[in-house]
Image (cartoon, rainbow, N blue to C red):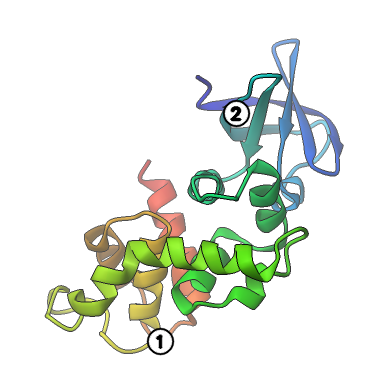
């Protein structure tokens, strides 16, 4: 229903940003990561998701499209509601969520408030399922063209993490292939996500 909102930041409190769009103030539930990018009185754009429940309509807003995409991926997992997804994104960036899923790092996810070991394991398993077929054969079978990222090393891990976030193996490999494979994995993911955002 809403793709994004652009207006002045009228109010902020933990978990909430209010955006004034032409005199209409929209209350957006959001992460601490997004709140850290906002300043009262400044003009901002939030990418939104309207969550429809029987007793309420909740509008979620995020400063980056990648954070919204990660939020949608998380809430699609059984047992992960909007509150848990916001808690995860308040503790971890989308890049860190992708890296945790690709590496099977449940401890990193457990840093989020309200996320226990069982839920963290489910998140890792469900996100990792999206890269399983790719990581089990795609890279080793020469899926990536010459000049693309190496099958071993940081580039391959970054490609797996981006695929866990929902990008196609081809798009992920192309995005990482343009970068310096000597960079740390999280930096490769961050730059690739920045490139995807610039193309939308």
> Callout 1: 10 Å neighbours few (<14), some, many (20+)?
few
Mark 2 lies on residue: 51
Secondary element at image label 2: strand
Task: Tell me: 147 left or right of 131.
Answer: left
Q: Which quadrant of the rendered structure holds the C terminus?
A: top left
Mark 1 lies on residue: 182
Q: Is residue 158 above or below residue 93?
A: below
Q: Is residue 64 above or below residue 178?
A: above
Image quarter for residue 128? bottom left
Query: Is any atom of residue 3 visible in this view?
Result: yes
Where is residue 68? Give x, y as percent: 54, 43
Q: Is residue 53 above or below residue 89?
A: above
Kindly report which numbered mark, 2 or 1, lies closer to the viewer in this rendering.
2
Q: How many marks?
A: 2
Which residue sits at x=71%, y=41%? 30
> Callout 2: 10 Å neighbours few (<14), some, many (20+)?
few
Image quarter for residue 127? bottom left
Where is residue 148? Give x, y as percent: 22, 76
């Amino acid at each position: 229903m809403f793709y994004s909102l652009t207006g002045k930041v009228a109010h902020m409190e933990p978990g909430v940003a209010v955006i004034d769009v032409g005199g209409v103030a929209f209350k957006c539930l959001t992460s601490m990561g997004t709140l850290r990018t906002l300043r009262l009185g400044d003009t901002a754009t939030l990418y939104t998701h309207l969550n429809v429940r029987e007793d309420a309509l909740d509008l979620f807003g995020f400063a980056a499209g990648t954070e919204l995409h990660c939020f949608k991926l998380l809430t699609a997992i059984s047992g992960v509601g909007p509150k848990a997804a916001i808690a995860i994104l308040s503790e971890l960036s989308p890049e860190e969520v992708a890296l945790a899923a690709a590496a099977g790092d449940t401890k990193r996810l457990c840093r989020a408030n309200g996320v226990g070991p069982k839920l963290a394991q489910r998140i890792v398993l469900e996100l990792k399922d999206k890269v399983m077929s790719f990581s089990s054969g795609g890279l080793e079978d020469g899926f990536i063209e010459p000049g693309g990222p190496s099958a071993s090393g940081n580039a391959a891990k970054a490609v797996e993490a981006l695929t866990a976030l929902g990008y196609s193996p081809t798009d992920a490999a192309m995005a990482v292939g343009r970068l310096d494979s000597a960079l740390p994995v999280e930096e490769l993911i961050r730059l690739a996500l920045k490139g995807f955002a610039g193309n939308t």
